[in-house]
Image: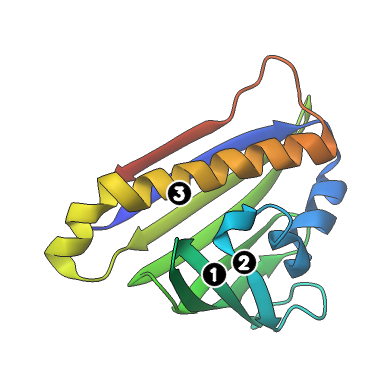
Amino acid sequence: MQLYQLKSKQVFPITKREAWDFLSDPKNLAVITPSHMGFHILAGADRPMFQGQVIQYIVKPFPMVSTKWVTEITHVKDGEYFVDEQRFGPYALWHHKHFLKEVPEGVEMEDIIDYKLPFGFLGRLVHPILVKKQLQKIFEFREQKLADLFGKVSGTKNQLSISKI
């Protein structure tokens, strides 16, 4: 069993509350997801985030491949962090932690995703050539979109890494 971990840190010149209000609204996930992924919320995003909330999406992880993705918000600490876990979807495991921290320049947004691919050896084989590259592109898009929305702190750069754990 091979687990992977994606870590991303970004700093934006906004308050922690502004960041929380944006990130805790499930509808905003569509705003920070590349359009080519065909992301569409089916159900569960009709109110602000809460522990136990189940959200259903359709997503196209790759061209011509569409899948249903169901996540549950398993932990929420208002203004601080939340965790979403895949209940059904393209991964064998998806555990995504979102943290917010005040820093002198504004707010630091940190994502830590632990994930596992299905299909055993085949999943491990396609990870570096397909999945890792796709996740990097998604988080690069997200960084740019958030910078367009909230501004950018000069001299800061997104820290993004994906590794085996």
- Whether label 1 touches label 2, CB < 8 Å: yes
Q: Quadrant of residue 28?
A: bottom right
Mark 3 is on which residue type? Leu
Q: Is residue 165 visible?
A: no
Residue 42, percent across and down? 67, 82
Query: Which mark's residue is nearer the viewer, 2 or 3?
Result: 2
Q: Quadrant of residue 50?
A: bottom right
Residue 59 is marked as 1
Residue 49, percent across and down? 75, 72
Above-or-below relation of 35 to 152: below
Q: Which residue is mark 2?
A: 39
Badge 1 density bin: few <14, some 14–19, many ≥20, Cα 10 Å: many
Residue 135 is marked as 3
Query: Which mark's residue is nearer the viewer, 3 or 1?
Result: 1
Q: How many marks?
A: 3
Mark earlier in primary sequence (1, 2): 2
Mark 1 is on which residue type? Val
Which quarter of the image is occupied by the N terminus? Answer: bottom left
Horizontal side, residue 75 vs residue 25: left or right = left
Mark 2 is on which residue type? Phe
**What's the residue at 50%, 66% (across, down)?**
60
Q: Quadrant of residue 123?
A: bottom left
**What's the residue at 64%, 56% (across, down)?**
35
